[in-house]
């Protein structure tokens, strides 16, 4: 039977019945055949109007008819439509012969029973409805009457046992699959019911405080009905709509409804908002070229689906643990805007709130979505140490390209551009809202504080001249937002190369030395003079060679203009007289200005120049002795 409620009275009464013999023999007590013509009893609409409709019976509608106590389901009676008036139908079925009193329940319930005039049945918690109607068999009705010896029932009037909740779904909602109507006060709405056949009313309900309408697709903007148990529904109902995509929307009413049997309560269009959906914010630190530039806070509430087209305004806020606003957004999705100068969001928990104004049929209503939390992660802190030597240029280390010509253009005793850099953008690094501190140590000395000049993320130690020929080390440690990073130690080799001796000198930090013989250190040359059978010799300082270094030697040595024309030997050796690199025989006035190569290492790192002559008087002058990277 299709039930459509309206303002007009809906009447169901037993009009007539007739008796005929069973055509087939049956076992057990003899049965009598009864025919009932029926229509609905009165009902009314409250709280709002509905368009007037008729109540129509459907072919095949069934009712349970009880003639004795304890009969499970009762007797099944089936309808047959009146061809001229679909509001009337004839129900036919069998009861025990001799029955004088009957009770009837709509719809037929195979699990129902009766005891002492009280029927136990089920008011379904799930009602598969269609637009403009309610689920077949959802609205229970009961009637009691008498049957005379001719099988004619009299005095039977079907009473509506349920109240009806009517509502419309919003026109913007799409793909809805079900609507759950729940009592906010927990009043039972469906489940097992007991029905007093004398009063024609439900006397108890045991089951669920909700009713689900749907299963198949619901139409947007359509009216639906839910049959519920009579009772006082304090503070109204919660409506929960689930779409095919799994989104859940909710709406609430606040008015207490004293729902009575046979009355329709039209609640209008429910203003649904997405429920079970908490806007989530994603916090992710931003880096450009490896440098920390801030924190992106992205939020999306696109799950509101149909409501987005009706949004009037947004207010999405993110606050830190002290309640300070750090981000805001006035759209449904996107990267939130920086507030109160918090370009970077330090580690910790942040709290998102979201409200919006919804244009609901011309009226603006503010909705509040559930709040959520997000945790800002630890930053990725990096400390970079700068500095290089001529050797770095030669070997292509510490960020330099391998180039002998570049290495030879550098000073062999200098460390260039010694510095400590961090990967924090200057505007964050110099902001007092963020905690940062750092130290550095050069060659293991006491730690010094890192100080970053305005607009910079680099602490410059500078270029260091006249450094010892050895390996120098730079260490640094930096802490930002609770994250401490120790930099990888920077090791820089100061070799003393290239060595430009024009001429060699016996003064300064890296001086040449006399080994034996008579040596005169002049401003433009070194004079080696044989006397007393001692060969004059000088040696260079010890260069620092961490590994093999190929070098080019460019000397300028002149046999002075003495009266003795005899040849003498010029010997250039490396580290010992046995490791002779070059021997040159020179006569009076000869000049040795050439270029030759050698390989230096940690064992072969001191140059010697020796003048060999067996008579007194001759001299050799050294004007230059340059050692270059090859």
Image (cartoon, rainbow, N blue to C red):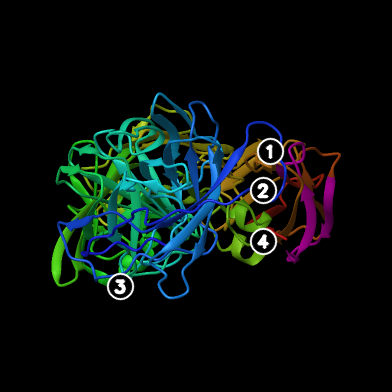
Q: Which residue occupies the foreground of this view, 498 or 431?
A: 431
Disc number placed over residue 121 in the picture, else none: none
Q: Check the picture and name the quadrant holding the C terminus.
A: bottom right
* Residue for point 77% across, 57% down: 564
Q: Distance between the residues labelled 4 and 2?
A: 38 Å
Element type at mark 4? loop
Contact between labelled residues 2 and 4, with CB atoms less than 8 Å apart: no
- Is residue 64 magenta-colored? no
Q: Which of marks 1 and 3 is in front?
A: 3
* Horizontal side of residue 568 vs 271, given as left or right: right
Q: Where is residue 122 in the image (x, y as percent from the top left)?
A: 45, 38
Residue found at the very far bottom of the displayed protein:
84
Element type at mark 2? strand
Closer to the chain start, of discs 1 and 2, is 1
Contact between labelled residues 2 and 1, with CB atoms less than 8 Å apart: yes
Disc number placed over residue 528 in the picture, else none: 2
- Is residue 599 magenta-colored? yes
Q: Label 2: how many residues lie within 10 Å, few (<14), some (14-19) or many (20+)? A: many
Q: Distance between the residues labelled 1 and 3?
A: 102 Å
Find disc 3 in the rendering and name its residue: 309
Contact between labelled residues 3 and 1, with CB atoms less than 8 Å apart: no
Q: Nearer the viewer, mark 2 or mark 3?
A: 3
* Horizontal side of residue 430 vs 526, given as left or right: left
Disc number placed over residue 402 in the picture, else none: 4
Range shown magenta: 580-607
Closer to the chain start, of discs 2 and 3, is 3
Q: Distance between the residues labelled 4 and 3?
A: 63 Å
Q: Label 1: how many residues lie within 10 Å, few (<14), some (14-19) or many (20+)? A: some
Q: Where is residue 381 in the image (x, y as percent from the top left)?
A: 44, 43
Image quadrant assignment for residue 425: bottom left
* Residue 345 vertical position relative to residue 185 in the rendered view, above or below: below
Find disc 1 in the rendering and name its residue: 517
């Amino acid at each position: 039977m299709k039930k459509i409620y309206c303002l007009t009275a809906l009447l169901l009464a037993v009009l007539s019945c007739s008796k005929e013999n069973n055509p087939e023999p049956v076992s057990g007590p003899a049965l009598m055949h009864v025919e009932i013509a029926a229509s609905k009893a009165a009902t009314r609409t409250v709280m709002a109007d509905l368009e007037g409709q008729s109540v129509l019976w459907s072919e095949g509608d069934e009712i349970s008819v009880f003639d004795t106590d304890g009969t499970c389901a009762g007797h099944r009676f089936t309808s047959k439509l009146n061809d001229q008036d679909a509001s009337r139908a004839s129900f036919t079925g069998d009861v025990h012969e001799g029955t004088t009193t009957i009770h009837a329940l709509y719809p037929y319930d195979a699990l129902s029973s009766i005891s002492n005039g009280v029927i136990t049945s089920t008011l379904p918690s799930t009602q598969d409805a269609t637009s403009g109607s309610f689920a077949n068999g959802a609205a229970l009705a009961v009637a009691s009457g008498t049957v005379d010896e001719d099988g004619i029932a009299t005095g039977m009037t079907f009473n509506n046992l349920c109240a009806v909740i009517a509502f419309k779904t919003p026109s913007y909602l799409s793909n809805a699959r079900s609507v759950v109507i729940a009592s906010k006060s927990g009043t039972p709405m469906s489940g097992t019911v007991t029905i007093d056949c004398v009063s024609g009313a439900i006397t108890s309900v045991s089951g669920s405080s909700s009713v689900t309408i749907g299963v198949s697709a619901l139409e947007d903007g359509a009216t639906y009905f839910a049959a519920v148990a009579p009772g006082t529904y304090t503070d109204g109902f919660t409506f929960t709509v689930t779409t095919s995509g799994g989104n859940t929307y909710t709406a609430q009413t606040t008015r207490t409804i004293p729902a009575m049997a046979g009355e329709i309560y039209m609640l209008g269009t429910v203003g649904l908002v997405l429920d079970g959906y908490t806007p989530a914010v994603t916090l992710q630190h931003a880096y450009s070229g490896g440098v920390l530039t801030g924190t992106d806070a992205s939020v999306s509430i696109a799950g509101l689906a149909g409501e987005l087209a009706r949004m009037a305004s947004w207010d999405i806020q993110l606050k830190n643990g002290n309640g300070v606003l750090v981000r805001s957004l006035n759209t449904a999705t996107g990267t939130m805007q920086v507030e109160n100068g918090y370009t970077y969001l330090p580690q910790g928990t942040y709290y998102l709130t979201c409200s919006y104004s919804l244009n609901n049929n011309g009226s603006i209503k503010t909705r509040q979505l559930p709040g959520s939390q997000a945790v800002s992660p630890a930053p990725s802190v990096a400390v970079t140490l700068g500095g290089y030597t001529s050797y770095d240029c030669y070997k292509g280390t510490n960020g330099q390209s391998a180039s002998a010509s570049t290495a030879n253009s550098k000073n062999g005793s200098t460390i260039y551009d010694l510095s400590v850099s961090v990967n924090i953008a200057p505007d964050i690094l110099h902001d007092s809202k963020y905690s940062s501190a750092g130290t550095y140590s050069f060659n293991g000395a006491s730690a010094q504080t890192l100080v970053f000049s305005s607009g910079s993320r680099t602490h410059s130690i500078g270029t260091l001249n006249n450094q010892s020929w050895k390996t120098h080390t730079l260490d640094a440690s930096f802490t930002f937002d609770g994250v401490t990073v120790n930099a990888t130690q920077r090791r820089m080799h100061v070799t003393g190369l290239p060595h430009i001796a024009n001429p060699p000198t016996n003064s300064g930090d890296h001086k040449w030395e006399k080994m034996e013989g008579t040596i005169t250190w002049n401003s433009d040359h070194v004079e080696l003079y044989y006397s007393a059978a001692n060969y004059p010799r000088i040696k260079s300082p010890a260069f620092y060679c961490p590994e093999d270094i190929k070098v080019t030697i460019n000397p300028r040595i002149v046999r002075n203009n003495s009266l003795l024309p005899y040849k003498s030997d010029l010997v250039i050796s490396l580290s010992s007289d046995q490791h002779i690199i070059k021997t040159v025989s020179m006569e009076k006035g000869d000049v040795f200005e050439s270029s030759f190569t050698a390989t230096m290492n940690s064992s072969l790192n001191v140059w010697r120049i020796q003048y060999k002559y067996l008579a007194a008087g001759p001299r050799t002058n050294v004007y230059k002795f340059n050692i270059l990277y090859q």
